[in-house]
Amino acid sequence: MGYFRMEKGPLAELLVERFENMPPQLRVAARFVLDHPKDVALMSMREQAHHAGVSHSTMMRLARWLGLDGYEDMRSLYARALRETIAGEPARRGIEQHGAPGYSTAGVVADTLAAQISSLGEYGNAMQFIAAAGLLARSRNLFALGSRSAYPVASHFVHIMSFVAGGDSKVALVGEMAGQGLDALQQAGRGDVLLAVGMSPYERTTIDVARQSARQGVGVVAITDSSVSPLTRIARETIIVTSNSQSFFRSMAPAFAAVEILAALTAVQSETNAAERVKQSEEQLAAFGIYWKPPR
């Protein structure tokens, strides 16, 4: 069963698989999605609910039943599938026709991630990114904090922001897993900024450190997964990303995308020639023999 044929829709298999276990109202909504995939791509959620004969909240519950963060994620998946159907995807269809094992799973996971990341560029989200980048661009020193699965996101932020920071500004990864312990934040205060990354279930250390930093006058920027996350109540600026996935794990891909968007916007606002700094760094590392070279 192909995920990119709009007569079926990208979530058709998943809907069919879970249909029997759905509450009655969700079945009505699911039947509409199965029978009208193009309408899912083109109509608003309220229009779809009206045509299906259910409330708009039922459509939102259906999306969450399927593991999505909201109904807009579903619409994005179907809109993408419609665009690809119109443009044509011969290579992907060719693989699908031969029944490659796992292809359907790969397709829906990839498209879910694409929809989640694409939603970060929507107007409301973009305004949050711009506000957060403004805070970062004005900062004296930057710190990043994240535990467990959020740790590599914070580490990636520090790596790319090291090319944006200017003068004597410091960019440091802090925390129990980092090279610098939490004591690096003892002297932090007004003018400094801490990026705190935390997804449910929230790490106590991340919440406590972010709260204490805010008490010291540090501006906290949070990347988290809910408007009711404890980090949201602490942070001066918050970026909300989804961590839902179509598999057994929580996805950190949208959080990684968020720090890259933040870095790009901060570089623009700080008027730093980050590209030149990257070039200089790579030349220096090459001189030390860090990079692999093919044998002559």
Image (tube, grey):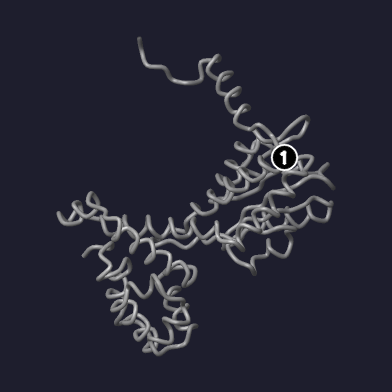
Q: Quadrant of residue 162?
A: top right
In the image, 115 versus 147, the foreground residue is 115
Taking the spot 55% from the left edge, 44% from the top edge, the residue there is 152
Q: Secondary structure at mark 1?
A: helix
Location of the C terminus (image quadrant) = top left
Q: Quadrant of residue 229?
A: bottom right
Q: Which residue is mark 1?
A: 270
Compared with residue 144, is residue 238 higher up or lower down, i.e. above or below?
below
Residue 232: percent from left, percent from top? 68, 63
Residue 149: percent from left, percent from top? 53, 51
The amino acid beneath tag 1 is Ser
- Relative to residue 289, is residue 219 drawn left or right? right
Query: Seen from this angle, which residue lies furthest top?
Result: 296
- Relative to residue 273, is residue 216 drawn left or right? right
Residue 100: percent from left, percent from top? 19, 53
Residue 281: percent from left, percent from top? 60, 24
- Relative to residue 66, is residue 36 drawn left or right? left
- Relative to residue 283, is residue 53 drawn left or right? left
Query: Seen from this angle, which residue lies furthest front?
Result: 86
In the image, 199 versus 96, the foreground residue is 96
Location of the N terminus (image quadrant) = bottom left
Taking the spot 83% from the left edge, 56% from the top edge, the residue there is 215
Compared with residue 141, is residue 206 higher up or lower down, i.e. above or below?
below
Taking the spot 43% from the left edge, 84% from the top edge, the residue there is 49
